[in-house]
């Protein structure tokens, strides 16, 4: 007899609709009552399949020169001065958040066509890495590798005649990765979606003696409207010309995501990421299933802002939506989540 989900299928079919115990002639043929395991909090806790802990969190921080300033499209989020970023790292350590992700807001005057400031060993993000690793070495630091916070056109790569150049961009990205590794970055996270960049970065890191620096590739990254608030935060929405559809993935594709991930693993990625998060849980589940790699989801800025905006309007319970959205990533197979909710959810989990 075919057994699926604990009871013989035929029995389950016969039991539909649910009979009351009195009607069941055969005492062994009692109706399944799914609600028994839900009737009290202790029972729900006992049978819960997935749990969110502070170990699942990567906290993205925006860094800026000078004083901390709010990001208008992301309620509760600021671009932090380096000093405040160090304080955030301290808070992360206290909350046992394992890792931070740093994103610089580059002064518009320092942006150019080639994104040259990305290669300045003393640029904002490198100074932030050094300051954080000096004060709070036990917290991991992840850095984005891509040129968009540094280019005057807001694209992740070099552009000629309106075309984003692949191999020329990869050559610059490997240098950017080295500059960040030299500053003390623990995880290099290429988010640019150029072909071949993971292998090139791995080779460059190893060649320079950074064999212990990890790579988390933004392996399946979609061309998404949900990045809008992030682009405000790093100042690239003002500069971005056109869109990123010639390098980021088409939202209509899923097989292609598996090929992207497979390539990045073959090229040496230690961890992989799917992005955005909630609209792409199917991709996350398939990727985790297919490769069994340490797999991360990025709950992106637009997802954060949607929940915050609805909560501020009183349209939903923000705290509950936050927790529910994050447990969904765990259920889909994520080993961790990059989320702007990280400190808030960690406080809740630790009951602070
Ligand atoms: C840069 C980058 C982006 C995000 C992370 N790294 C934006 C983009 O690709 O345009 C988005 C993160 C978010 O929306 O929170 N390459």
Image (tube, rainbow, N blue to C red):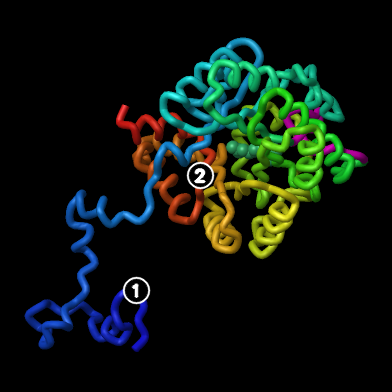
Q: Position of residue 139 (x, y in %)?
A: 53, 27
Circle 2 Cα neighbour tier, 10 Å, few/some/many (<14 / 14–19 / ≥20): many
Say left or right for 20 vs 267.
Answer: left
136 and 301: which is toward the camera: 136
SS at circle 1: loop
Alpha-carbon span between mark 2 and mark 1:
28 Å
Pointer 2 residue: 336
Q: Quadrant of the C terminus?
A: top left
Residue 5's disc number: 1
Q: Is residue 316 magenta?
A: no
Q: Which residues are magenta?
A: 146-160
182 and 39: which is toward the camera: 182
User: Residue 351, located in which quarter of the rendered image?
Assistant: top left
Distance from mark 1 CB to nearest ligand 1 atom below 8 Å:
no
Circle 1 Cα neighbour tier, 10 Å, few/some/many (<14 / 14–19 / ≥20): few
Majority secondary structure in the magenta region: loop
Q: Is residue 163 visible?
A: no
Q: Where is 108 relative to 195, above or below? A: above
Say left or right for 5 vs 270.
Answer: left
Residue 46's disc number: none
Q: Is residue 155 magenta?
A: yes
Name the outermost residue toward the left: 22
Residue at (55, 62) in percent of width and height: 289
162 and 41: which is toward the camera: 41
176 and 278: which is toward the camera: 176
Q: Position of residue 228 (x, y in %)?
A: 62, 37
């Amino acid at each position: 007899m075919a057994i699926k989900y604990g009871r013989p299928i035929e029995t389950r079919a016969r039991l539909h609709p649910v009979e009351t115990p009195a009607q069941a002639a055969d005492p062994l043929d009692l109706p399944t009552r799914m609600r028994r395991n839900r009737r009290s909090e202790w029972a729900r806790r006992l049978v819960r399949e997935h749990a969110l802990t502070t170990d699942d969190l990567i906290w993205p921080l925006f860094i800026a020169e000078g004083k901390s300033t709010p990001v208008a499209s992301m309620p509760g989020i600021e671009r932090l001065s380096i000093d405040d970023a160090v304080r955030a790292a301290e808070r992360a350590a206290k909350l046992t958040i394992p890792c931070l992700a740093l994103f610089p807001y580059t002064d518009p005057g320092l942006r150019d066509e080639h994104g040259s400031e990305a290669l300045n060993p003393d640029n904002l993000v490198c100074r932030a890495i050094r300051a954080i690793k000096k004060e709070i070495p036990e917290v991991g630091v992840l850095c984005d590798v891509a040129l968009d916070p540094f280019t005057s056109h807001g694209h992740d790569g070099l552009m000629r005649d309106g075309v984003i150049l692949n191999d020329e961009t990869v050559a610059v990205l490997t240098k950017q990765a080295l500059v960040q590794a030299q500053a003390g970055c623990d995880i290099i996270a290429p988010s640019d979606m150029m072909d071949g960049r993971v292998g090139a970065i791995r080779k460059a890191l190893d060649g320079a003696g950074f064999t212990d620096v990890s790579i988390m590739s933004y392996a399946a990254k979609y061309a998404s409207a949900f990045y809008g608030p992030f682009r405000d935060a790093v100042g690239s929405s003002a500069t971005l010309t056109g869109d990123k559809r010639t390098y980021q993935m088409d939202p209509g594709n899923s097989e292609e995501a598996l090929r992207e991930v497979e390539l990045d693993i073959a090229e040496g990625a230690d961890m992989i990421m799917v992005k955005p998060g909630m609209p792409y849980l199917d991709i996350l589940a398939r990727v985790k299933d297919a490769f069994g790699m340490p797999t991360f989801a990025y709950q992106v800025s637009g997802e954060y802002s949607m929940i915050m905006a609805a909560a501020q309007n009183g349209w939903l319970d923000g705290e509950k939506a936050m927790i529910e959205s994050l447990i969904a990533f765990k259920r889909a197979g994520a080993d961790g989540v990059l989320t702007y909710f990280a400190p808030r959810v960690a406080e809740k989990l630790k009951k602070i």
